[in-house]
Image (spheres, rainbow, N blue to C red):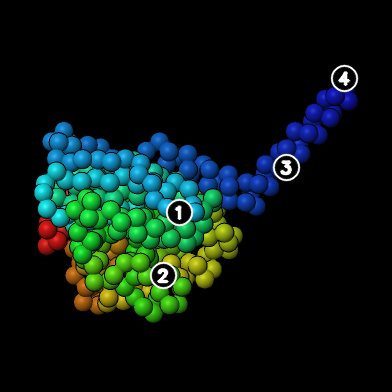
Amino acid sequence: MKSIFKDTGIVLFVCLLLSLFVAVFTPYPAAGVIHQVFSNGGPAKEPTNYLEVNQKIDVQKNLSYPSSAANNRYDLILPKTTGKHPVIFWLHGGAYVGGQKEDVSIYTNMLAAEGFAVVNIEYDLAPRTRYPGPLIQLAEVYREIQLKATDYSLDLENVVFGGDSAGGQIVAQFINSQVNDEYAQGTGFERTVDPATIKSAIFFCAPFSLSEATKPLRELPLLDFFVKRIGWAYTGNPDWFESTIIQEADMLTHITGNFPRSFITDAHNFSFEDQGKALAKLLESQGTEVVTAFYDSQEELDHEYQFDMTLPASQATFEAVVEFLKPLK
């Protein structure tokens, strides 16, 4: 009997050591925890007129686009109005390891109700699909939409790319790879979209320099543990802070005056407000039109606040976004 207990104890001890090894020396457990957090959905809440919104649109869910990566799905939301519609491509957030397109579906439906065709994109997540996987999938879904432009009266001469949180960073990098020849050549990204057709960009609570954005988090041991492993999951490099990938993905050092007019908003609690303001300042210095929505700290707004349409600030931001997009219609 003692031998059985001893053998069981050894097995449990070995399992514990293996678990600790996997947790410390691989990104998988930490990425799984963050993924689970995002699987519960984001802060999105419907506006009071959401029934009216849904009456103005047609939604085609879970359409597929050709890709070697998984999660190659998207929703196509179309306004019921006649004529050709400008197209908004939207990429959800989730720290590169979590999130799903359903987190932003209320908002994408609201945008469509304003007269835009909206492509709400799902993409595969880290660590299963690593950088630059999401950028490649964004190009893939664009090519799929090109094939459907005539059937659905899509105006691909007037295109908007938007994203929230990590999705915003991916979108910023994708746009830069399309409009900046030097950047595209240096990174090897293929040009998929005619730069002249990218009329606007929208960024919600997005980091634009990952090394700078994560510095405050890395001062706290527990958060530092997760931040390191999220970056590891996305880049495949445990030393990602100093990697060429992070330098390549730093939009505060690579964006030039070719970037499209942009709408930028962020919150001050647990978010990347300084990053949003830095990008706005950079774009303005280069002569790019920028519209921002930053609020007084007394508002107590948290990361991704803009999706909670019960908040006065979120309602004001949505109205500002609609006004920003008017020149495309």
Task: Judge whether residue 127 can be spotted in this image.
Answer: yes
User: In terms of depth relative to the viewer, which is nearer, 195 or 38?
Assistant: 195
In the rendered image, the quadrant that contains the N terminus is: top right
Q: Secondary structure at mark 2?
A: loop
The residue under label 4 is: 1
Residue farthest bottom in this picture: 182
The quadrant where residue 311 appears: top left
Find residue 190 and name its label: 2
Type of residue at label 1? Ser
Mark 3 neighbour class, 10 Å CA radius: few under 14, some 14 to 19, many 20 or more: few
User: In terms of depth relative to the viewer, which is nearer, 270 or 237?
Assistant: 237
Q: Secondary structure at mark 4?
A: loop
Residue farthest top in this picture: 1
Type of residue at label 2? Glu
Q: Residue 141, position in %: x, y?
A: 36, 55
Nearer the observer: mark 4 or 2; the answer is 2
Q: CA distance from mark 1 to mark 2?
A: 15 Å
The residue under label 3 is: 17
Q: Secondary structure at mark 3?
A: helix
Q: CA distance from mark 1 to mark 4?
A: 56 Å
Q: Residue 139, position in %: x, y?
A: 38, 61
Q: CA distance from mark 4 to mark 3?
A: 24 Å
Q: Secondary structure at mark 1?
A: loop
User: In terms of depth relative to the viewer, which is nearer, 314 or 324?
Assistant: 324
Mark 2 neighbour class, 10 Å CA radius: few under 14, some 14 to 19, many 20 or more: few
Q: CA distance from mark 1 to mark 3?
A: 38 Å
The residue under label 1 is: 67
- Which callout, 1 or 4, points at the residue further toward the start of the chain? 4
Type of residue at label 4? Met
Type of residue at label 3? Leu
Point 35% across, 67% down: residue? 192
